[in-house]
Image: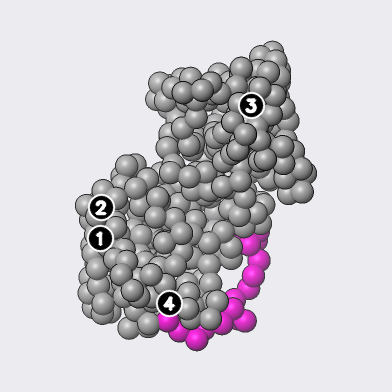
Amino acid sequence: MAESLKSNGYQMVAYVPDEVADRLLQLLHRDGALTMVSATREEEALAILCGGFLGGKKGVLVMQGSGLGNSINALCGLAIGYQIPFLMVISERGRLGEFNSVQVPLGRAAPRIFEALGVQAFWINHPEEIAPIVEGATKLAFGGGLPVALILSTALSGGKTWR
Amino acid sequence: MTRLEAFQRLLPLLGRAAVLANLGKNTYDLFAAGHRPENFYTWGAMGTVSSVGLGLALARPDLRVVVLDGDGSLLMNLGSLATIAALRPSNLVHIVCDTQTYETTGGQASHTAVAADLAAIGRGAGLSHVEAVVDLDALAQAVRRGLAEPGPWLIVARMEGTATTASKVPRRPIYDKYRFMEAIGSTGR
């Protein structure tokens, strides 16, 4: 995923720390060429990427599935309303393998939230899908002028562990 | 000072700086004070304008980025102060028009009317260039400094609201995005 994001020209990564995406974020940090922004909340991270786009930078939002709920008003009032594209890389919660009951409601709702918002979302279940899906989603997002979501399924990542 | 008076005073100081206006009265008064292609007007996503400013400031270190925020909006996104303090973009000037009210929803009091001190919160978030001002001269002086010296700057300006309405402001976000990006020299790809 880190290699695919770099080869597709992403320059700015805004995120809220996440266990599943931690290794990805470490690799992107280590690269040194990307602007990495740890935000306090997913809505904030999304707005930072919108500002980055206004400044000409291609951005990726990395968060866990629960962050989708926190980001919806900015997704509507900035990204969709102004047609500002970026990639969302979301680690799935509340789906196969979930151990925490309160993570289930948003995980269960997420596919229909994307559908209701008109945001195209693609689930990644196998490692070999990563490169073609990131490339295709990048073309779709920046060609179509809207954010596109990639969901790292629990089948791909193994999901979050209990800590 | 009123917000319109404040913006009229500030505009001649700004040169080609990018200016991002918070939704509602900041957008209306910025347009009324003087439209320029480097103005970006927001119409929704309350609370996020400081974060849009941070992203733009990080993406374009060659540009001065001025955010015109509101007290109610910043109270919705206090975390952005901590993020700005952590990233330290030297080209960001974050001005809060603290009218102590939610003006576009009917003038209800915000918590800055009661107890909250946004400048103190900014210092507590880790910002070191923080000014609190209550009159036009002090505001202009603080903004001149913010535009000339490395920041990030947080300028909390206590002021009165205005009766300016949205009626004369063209509401065309997608056109405005392209116009703004062209004005500041961004390609968008």
Taking the magenta stretch, the answer to whether it contains residue A59 is: no
Task: Determine the CA span between mark 4 and mark 3.
Answer: 43 Å
Taking the magenta stretch, the answer to whether it contains residue B168 is: yes
SS type, badge 2: helix
Task: Determine the CA span between mark 3 and mark 1.
Answer: 41 Å
Task: Determine the CA span between mark 1 and mark 2.
Answer: 6 Å
- Is B38 above or below relative to A108? below
Query: Hey, what amino acid is under mark 2?
Result: Gly
Cβ–Cβ under 8 Å for marks 1 and 2 = yes
Residue A98 circle label: 3
Query: Hey, what amino acid is under mark 1?
Result: Ala
Of callouts 4 and 2, which one flags the residue occurring earlier in the amino acid sequence?
A: 4
Instruction: Read off the chain for label 2.
Output: B
User: Label 3 neighbourhood size at 10 Å, few (<14), some (14-19), many (20+)?
Assistant: some
Q: Nearer the viewer, residue B77 or B169?
A: B77
Residue receiving disc 1: B120
- Is B40 above or below relative to B91? below
Same chain for marks 1 and 2? Answer: yes
